[in-house]
Amino acid sequence: MTQTSTELYYLTIREAGRLIKARELSPVDLTRALLERIEAVDGKLKTYVTLLADEALAQAKAAEAEIQQGRYRGPLHGIPMAHKDLYDTKGVRTTGQSKVNEHRVPKEDATVIRRLAEAGSILLGKLAMFEFAMGGPETSLFEQARNPWNVDYVTSGSSSGSGAAVAAGLAMGSLGSDTGGSIRGPASYCGIVGLKPTYGRVSRYGVLPLSWSLDHCGPMTRTVEDAALMLQAIAGYDAKDPSTSQTPVPDYAAALKEDVKGLVIGVPKAYCFNSEADIDSETIAAVDKALRDLEGLGARVEEVSIPSLEYVPVANNVILLSEAFTYHLPNLKSQPQNYGEAFISRLYMGGLLTASDYVQAQRVRSSIKREFDQVLQRVDLIGMPTSNNPPVTLEEFKPGSWLHGPSFTAPFNETGMPAISVPCGFTQAGLPIGLQLAGKPFDEPTVLRAAYAYQQHARLYEKRPPA
């Protein structure tokens, strides 16, 4: 079988995995195609902060030898990936894109990195991010990633390099992290799929924290199938992370059906379709059409009311900033000069919050959980935009903008519900728009099923950025 390198680096994980299993595609050829693509375009996209070209080729050769010997590990065997630079990688610098950790080299892999390696995936390198998953786009170390649909625009954060690298064919999949939307936001802005699993579904051991009670780890891929395959490899209890759940891990790929008949999708229209509340009209139109498409596929869409949603941004920010300040306090005292201005200016706000503020925010969080629990007794999923606005230029981006206006992603960090962003359209300027679907805790199969059905209908994953 002959394929050009272009065909190779834009294969999905599932497509490449099937070819590798059939021995019609060499993991070495696939890895070389990705490395050539990185060399060709990453000079302008700035997605990689650490490239492991020689190591990746050595892993690819080892994977090929194993497969030839009949020791095929599964659908991720021989698949080149790269991950956000807050996942510990043994012997490879992990910085959180901050001078605070400029020379930090972990002695062991994060649990999810180890699990992906055991599944046979290949590590191409580490990817750019907002500093410590909150600063940015400016950071105190490395340049910031650019949006492959238009390099003058932001990728959103904080998993900025992950979103851009996957969209541009520089990695076949990536692990991002999500505290208030940092997987789903870049997925929406870069036109890919981003899945935040249920809180406790995926281990966070060996992952630099931002906010212990809000942080989630999850996959960023070009397709829903690929997200399901990555989740299968990383999900499950980890004794090293006491927050992980022992709830059994289902077969996520088995949930992927082009059928949403009977599913009920609740939409909080008063909150997320309000054109007077700084919500972009093109986003509203694209997401509304996507929901109507799901109705056409057999789902039922109904309006729901979740009164406490308007308080989510404040509550989420109070919890996030309080926990982040607590984690960083030792380094704030010893090396404040090594933090970037964007990050440290936000972090100091956490030091101004009181225990009472934190408790009140947790009380709001409890109210939101109760309201979602009530709504989810009569609907299967929540549907809404991923972001309230499409990407803006790097010059237009306001570093503190995340503190103001509505948030469509933060509610699912506060509740711990699984949520996915899937491409649902483009603005007139050619920038991606994301549809977000969220489900009941540990019901990733239903979330994946609906996202997959929509994906197969819309087929927007087949579009390629110009970069």
Image: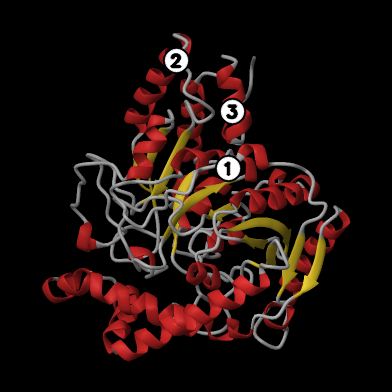
- Nearest the viewer among 405 and 108 is 108
SS category of the residue bearing label 3? helix
Looking at the rendering, in which quadrant would you find the N terminus?
top right
Q: What's the amino acid at mark 3?
A: Ala
Q: Disc 1 and disc 3: Cα gap in Å?
A: 15 Å
In the rendered image, which residue does mark 3 sit on?
16
Which percent across, then down, holds residue 385?
Answer: 67, 68
Looking at the image, residue 49 lies above or below residue 338: above
Spatial CA distance of label 2 from label 1 is 22 Å
Pointer 2 local density, CA inside 10 Å: few below 14, some 14–19, many at least 20: few
Q: Most extreme residue toward the top, as rendered?
A: 69
Residue 17 to residue 81: above or below: above
Residue appearing at x 29%, y 60% in the figure:
141
Vertical placement of residue 89 versus 318, above or below: above
Q: Secondary structure at mark 2?
A: loop
Q: Residue at x 48, y 51 (%)?
A: 218
Mark 3 and mark 2 in contact (Cβ < 8 Å)?
no
- State left or right for residue 221 relative to residue 213: right
For disc 1, the marked residue is: 228
Type of the residue with mark 1: Ala
User: How many numbered marks does the figure carry?
Assistant: 3
Q: Residues within 10 Å of mark 3 (few under 14, many from 20)?
A: many
Residue identified by numbered label 2: 71
Question: Do labels 1 and 3 touch, CB within 8 Å?
Answer: no
